[in-house]
Amino acid sequence: MTKYLYQKHITNIMTSRVRFCPRCQSTDIELYAGGQTGAYRCKKCGYVGPLILEKDIILTSKDNKK
């Protein structure tokens, strides 16, 4: 019974994926060259490359209401 409640609780958690620059950790990134090259560009430090970092964050109930 406890295992079922735990699984149900996990399915109700809202997450969001955040992409950020590997050089300066800024989230202000965009696709470079219209996405044709598969590269990203950071607007803050000027990094251009195919590698970006992604992190899943758990949204609180306060964040879900926005």
Image: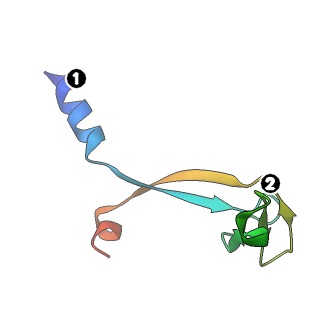
> Residue 45 vs residue 1: left or right?
right
- Marks 1 and 2, the one that precedes in the sequence: 1
Secondary structure of residue under mark 1: helix
Return the residue at label 1. Answer: 3
**Spatial distance from mark 1 to mark 2, Cα to Cα?**
41 Å
**Badge number at residue 50:** 2
Residue 55 is situated, as x and y percent measured from the top left of the image, at: 58, 51
15 w.r.t. 45: above or below: above
Amino acid type of the residue that numbered disc 1 sits on in the rendered structure: Lys
For this rendering, which residue is in front, 56 or 62?
Answer: 56
Assign a secondary structure to mark 2. Answer: loop
Where residue 4 sits, quadrant-wise, is: top left
- Asked if residue 7 lies left or right of residue 17, the reply is left
Q: Tags 1 and 2 in contact by the CB under 8 Å rule?
A: no
Quadrant assignment for the C terminus: bottom left
Q: Hey, which quadrant is residue 18 in on the image?
A: bottom right
Q: Position of residue 14 (x, y in %)?
A: 34, 54
Could you classify mark 2 by the number of other residues whose Cα lies within 10 Å: few (under 14), some (14-19), or many (20 or more)?
A: few
Task: Name the residue located 28 percent from the left edge and 41 percent from the top edge.
Answer: 11
> In the shown orientation, is residue 52 left or right of residue 60?
right
